Amino acid sequence: MRTRPLASILEATCDAILDLTLFPLALEADSNGAYVLGVMGEDALRTRSRGPYTPDNLPPEVVSTIRFAALRWSVKPERPEFTVEGGGRWPRLLMVLPHSKVSIRFVVPEDAPPIPEPAPHNAGPGGDIRLALEFVVRTLDATRMRTGKEPPLSLRLSFPEDPDYDSKVASVPDDWADLLLPAIPTIQLDRRRCSRRQRKAHDDAVRTVAYTDQTIDPLGRHGFTTWLGSARVQDPH
């Protein structure tokens, strides 16, 4: 049995996002696994198609994405499993890493949720999301070292509107404006299944693993909020 199930899943998720150069538009995770949603890469979208599809007429976007992912995992011990979801108007691909318990669904831009993505040359927001997930991993490990097990929390990624976006854009040169997102990548923790002792231990871990200049602010009755670059980790409950 894994002694750090969610931490291991989040580490595998970060590795997959990095290996696939994927900006996560949605992400949910708990000790049972992680689910990620992202748009297929630029190379896969050079040739476009529209369904319905058949086993003899697979969407080229999906075929290209499978080849790309299979090449990335060809040097890894884990073999991804692929399911082509071609029954709708637009092609989709589900990639599952069974050992890591990570599922990634690739969609085309027309099928993606209305979430602002960073410009192709802007790796900052995606990197900050990984930093936020890695911060959560460190808090889980620190809690486990203190209590003997991970706290039973879950998390999801959301993109609430940034109320200060206009003022931020006005404060930077024009050629830097596209580096800013009008939304805040937010890793929202759900610790409602934690006992009082587990929550207290995790609160202590949050402060212990924080960087020297990282501020941990209270939020709500028992929650907190903190920033990792442009991304935010918070528990609003």
Image (cartoon, rainbow, N blue to C red):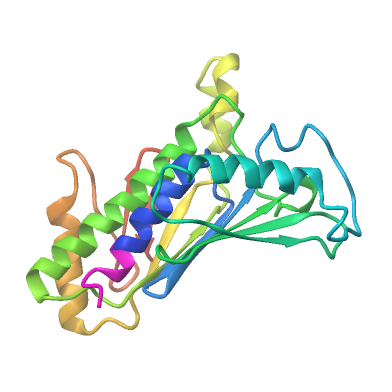
Q: Where in the figure is residue 17, as x and y percent of width and height?
A: 48, 46
**Magenta span of residues:** 1-7
Asked whether residue 126 is drawn in magenta, I would say: no
- Residue drawn at the location 54% of the way across and 40% of the way down: 71
Q: Is residue 116 in sight in this rendering? A: no
In the depicted view, which residue is nearer to us: 80 or 121?
Answer: 80
**5 vs 194: above or below:** above
Quarter of the image with the C terminus in it = bottom left
Q: Quadrant of residue 40?
A: top right
Q: Where in the figure is residue 171, as x and y percent of width and height?
A: 50, 22
Q: Is residue 173 left or right of residue 146?
A: right
Q: Is residue 181 in sight in this rendering? A: yes
- Residue drawn at the location 45% of the way across and 41% of the way down: 18
Q: Is residue 105 left or right of residue 12?
A: right
**94 vs 5: above or below:** above
Q: Quadrant of residue 55?
A: bottom right
Q: Where in the figure is residue 145, as x and y percent of width and height?
A: 10, 67
**87 vs 185: above or below:** below
Q: Where in the figure is residue 82, as x and y percent of width and height?
A: 62, 59
- Residue drawn at the location 55% of the way across and 54% of the way down: 160
Q: Is residue 171 left or right of residue 215?
A: right
In the depicted view, which residue is nearer to us: 230 or 215?
Answer: 230
In the depicted view, which residue is nearer to us: 36 or 232?
Answer: 36
**29 vs 23: above or below:** below
Quarter of the image with the N terminus in it = bottom left
- Residue drawn at the location 80% of the way across and 48% of the way down: 110
